[in-house]
Image (cartoon, helix red, strand yellow):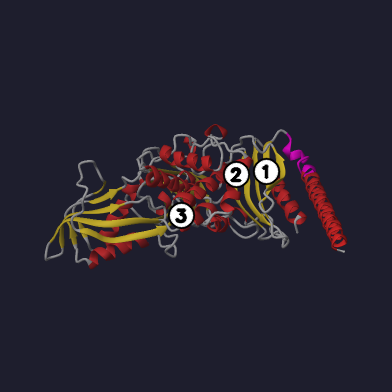
Amino acid sequence: MDCLKFVFKICYTTVLLFISAAFFLISLEANTTDTNNLSKHLLVLLKNPSLKNVSYGISIVSIKENTPVFNHRSDDLFCVASNMKLLTTAAALEYLGPDFEYKTSVEARGTITALGELNGDIIIKGSGDPNLSGRFYDGNILAVPEAWTNAIKNRGIHKITGDIIADDSIFDRLYTNPNWAENQLSKWYCAQSCGLSFNDNCVDITLAPDKKPGGAVTLLIVPDTSYFTIFNNCFYTTNKKEHAYSIYRKPGTNQIFIKGKFWVNASPEKQWVNVHNPALYLATVFKEVLEKNGIVVCGNARLISESDAVNSDLGKITQTTSTMEQTILVTNKRSQNFYAEQILKTLGAQINGKGCLNSGIEVLHNFLSKLGFHSDEYQIEDGSGLSKGNRLSPRIITSLLIYMNKHPYGKVLYDSLPVSGTDGGLRHRMISPQYNSRVRAKTGYIAKTSALSGYIDTSNGDKLAFSILMNNFKNLSAIRKVQDDICRVLVDFYN
């Protein structure tokens, strides 16, 4: 009897194993078939005539299964444009974390008399914070220097005999990446990187309409400061076809030239021009705010020098802080090059002790080494993606996305990505209900380069990491449509 039970048990176990193996093979075959079907759909899209002579690479990976779903030249190198920001912001989360604080302090040195006279200087000590603007202060560009002014008043200081000194020493003074196009260096997206920054290191210039043809266009300038000089050679015209103008800052100066014609019936048009020497810009604006609020400043606004004493014997008067999480959100949602470059030099300063371009890039190299990539498998020239010399592969980007999906701070990166049909660079893309909010991805564009990389959440609980890098095309809108169509196919297939 026991023998029969033993034989039955063996037979039963064998049948179970056989059935399990059969189901596994059927499931494996189904998964393979599914992947093949998806590949067929994608390959049809890639026959689009707009991709003729276009160089592109694609990597799509199932994070749950840890398997590739689709690859096309996924190990080849491509220019990535603002997809570089994925690497820069992910490295910031890896090495510094979202709670890292930028701290900008206003300090005093000298003596304060009973009459409220500071016989000495005010020092603004920078930390590389890119957030000293109106962005987090209800749009009030002067909110931070005004808060500092109130703190000085509360300290009982009514007169400063010395200078307003900008201490930007946490970063070097190589303000602009040498690999960026020279003819674009006054544009807002080429804003200079500095240890002390203000208003994204730009001035806001609004051209206002007027019914008087022939006169110089009215300019609304914020902040209204003596730091720059504007040469206005833009005039009103009644001919709408003549409406065209240019704004340009002479390199190495803060001389801004506006030329052209402005139609009298046009709506106001806001432009941004970056400034030269951002730390001195902030010190100048702060000095002017102090004076407008009745505090006499006898000295000048200037940069800190090697001869300046390091200590501020009267200590800190006030401090302004912001977090890395805030910074990353702006970097990726708004694709702010200036923010990315500030993060890059912050990484260099905090991790390697040198707030410079090469030190920051070294941190990115170390991070990619953690992900299993050697330095000869890619090329990095900046933190924002503005340089055409940046080269990554789609597989590097999806590997980064997979790593960050499991990272303790991965949700910070995920939440910073533009959402399809909702915000950032995707607010006007994939807007129909079935695709709205289904894709979270970083866009990227510079001349002849378009990129889209990020995540797609599927209905079966999986998440796809994808990277689509496209170079050397003629029609940007056609290329973006192909990228969006790929995302639509993925959403539909895994719905």
Q: Which residue is situated farthest in the left direction here? A: 114
Q: Earlier in the sequence, mark 1 or mark 2?
A: 1
Kindly report the distance in space between the C-alpha atoms of the residues bearing marks 3 and 1: 27 Å
Look at the image and tell me whether residue 231 can be seen.
Answer: no
Q: Residues within 10 Å of mark 3 (few under 14, many from 20)?
A: some
Residue drawn at 62 percent across, 42 percent down? 450
Residue annotated with mark 1? 59
Q: Which residue is mark 2?
A: 397
Q: Position of residue 294 (x, y in %)?
A: 23, 63
Does 154 sit above or below residue 356?
below
Amino acid on which the number 3 mark rests in the picture: Gly
- 291 left or right, relative to 93: left
Q: Which secondary structure lies at badge 1? A: strand
Q: Which residue lies under the disc numbered 3?
A: 97
Q: Residue furthest top?
A: 376
Q: Nearer the viewer, residue 411 or 33?
A: 33
Do the residues bearing badges 1 and 2 touch, measured as CB atoms within 8 Å? yes
Between discs 3 and 1, the one toward the N terminus: 1
